[in-house]
Image: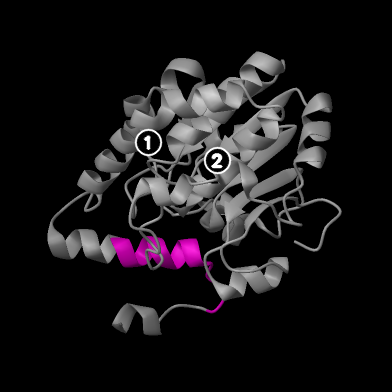
Amino acid sequence: MAKLLEISREETPPQIGSMIHSIIRKATGERDPYRDIKRLHNEQVLGMEENFAGLIAGSSSPLSDALKLAAVGNLIDMGPERKWNSMQDIFRDFTERDSAHFDSASFEESIRSAGTLLYLGDNAGEIVLDKILIGLLLRKTSLDITYAVRGGPVINDATMEDAQFVGMTDIVRVIDTGVDFPGVVPEACSDKFLDHYNGADMILSKGQGNYESLSEEDKNIFFLLQTKCPVIADKIGCGVGDIVLKSRQGTSL
């Protein structure tokens, strides 16, 4: 609480989150307090991967459904209050989920003219669903795709260890941000990450933490997330719990 009193109002939620969790790690003596739950979530969603991949392959709208699957999986987040009891609860009837703020048509149009895509990951567990979406994009497009994880453990966000565990490193280039923020704050990230960030034709930004830190960036960014708090829902103009796929360009995001 003493540290929170010192925080500037200019700090983003991911910057504040990084500070809070550095205190937690120091107090507990545990480098990765969420290691066990991350491993459990990775294992649980890996157990569903084959069924999900088959469902996407047989879909009449495979890209839209793969995007929806990745979006609903964004609920696997140990930061906000947990509102689900099992993995099955999260994914039930996900293909039927609809939202006025889910613009898969614009995303599909954008990838037609893009050569490089930087995919900014969010949490463990849902990284398996990102893998399914990336696999589809690799098969259906000529995109050069790079996937980015956090530079160190923070909450249940995915790190390089998670990317290796779920097999993401087997299908695509994986880099990290260079910092342990639960979001992407460009001025704090490594030069290697920034080379990919600044050079990408298109960015797919996953999760609310990435949205909170990048929503004002003037880039070709598509935000893919499930809203988890009234502040962000109000800013986007949707309801809490809605799935969102929106472009930064040409919108009020």
Residue 88 lies, in percent from the top left, at 39, 46
Which secondary structure, mark 2?
Answer: helix
Q: Amino acid at mark 2?
A: Ala
Q: Which residues are magenta?
A: 9-21
Q: Which mark is residue 70?
A: 2
Q: Label the magenta part by its dominant secondary structure.
A: helix
User: For residue 43, which quarter of the picture?
Assistant: top left
Q: Is 45 situated left or right of 11 in this image?
A: left
Residue 11: within the magenta?
yes
Residue 109: within the magenta?
no
Q: Which mark is residue 45?
A: 1
Q: Which mark is residue 33?
A: none
Distance (Cα) linking label 1 and label 2? 12 Å
Could you tell me which quadrant the C terminus lies in?
bottom right
Residue 189 lies, in percent from the top left, at 51, 46
Q: Is 105 situated left or right of 225 in this image?
A: right
Could you tell me which quadrant the N terminus lies in?
bottom left
Does label 1 or label 2 sit earlier along the sequence?
1
Q: Nearer the viewer, residue 86 or 235?
A: 86
Q: Which residue is painted at 62% across and 22% down in the image? A: 58
Q: Nearer the viewer, residue 79 or 215?
A: 79
Residue 218 lies, in percent from the top left, at 77, 52
Q: Amino acid at mark 1?
A: Val
**Relative vertical location of residue 218 with respect to residue 202 in this rendering, above or below:** below
Q: Which residue is painted at 43% across and 54% down in the image? A: 181
